[in-house]
Image (cartoon, helix red, strand yellow):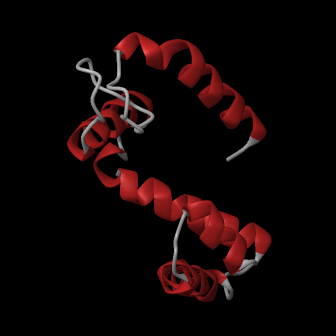
Amino acid sequence: MSDRAEEILSDYIENARPEYAPAEKEEAVFLNRSGQRISVRAIQKLVKKYMLSSVPDKADRITPHKLRTTFAENMLMKTGDVEKVQKLMGHSSISSTMHYVTSTEEAIEAVRNLSQD
């Protein structure tokens, strides 16, 4: 995560998260109004909400998984270092990260012969 994202997240954890009154052992960063971990479905709904308001013509194709995949592919293309991407993605196994290598190689192959008019 970028330094700026870390700064914003730290501020949230220190100042806003306590307002949700999390249980003492709750480790989740983002909580619902009951102070419990937000659900996968809640995240999907949030992504859809913000995609509809920002890119309505593409909102049906953008999911949390697509955002994660795009992040991984972009980081891999920029760094060329699959181990760095593995760490950024939080994968315990390099084989999980290798999925993105294949996707990136296919994307490069698809555009490598486009003319540069």
Rendering coords of residue 100 (x, y %): 53, 78
Towards the viewer: 1 or 92:
92
Rendering coords of residue 4 (x, y %): 74, 33
37 to 76, vertically: above or below? above
19 to 84, vertically: above or below? above
User: How many callouts does the rendering have?
Assistant: 0
Towards the viewer: 22 or 43:
22
Rendering coords of residue 88 (x, y %): 63, 61
Q: Is residue 101 visible?
A: yes
Q: Quadrant of residue 31?
A: top left
At a point 78% along the width and 70% down the height, the residue shown is 79
91 to 109, vertically: above or below? above
Towards the viewer: 14 or 75:
14
At a point 27% along the width and 30% down the height, the residue shown is 36
Seen as rendered, the residue at the extreme front is 24
Q: Is residue 117 visible?
A: no
- 108 left or right of 79 in image: left
26 to 64, vertically: above or below? above
- For the C terminus, the image quarter is bottom right
Q: Quadrant of residue 47?
A: top left
Rendering coords of residue 103 (x, y %): 51, 81
- 68 left or right of 109 in image: left
At a point 50% along the width and 14% down the height, the residue shown is 16
Q: Quadrant of residue 6?
A: top right
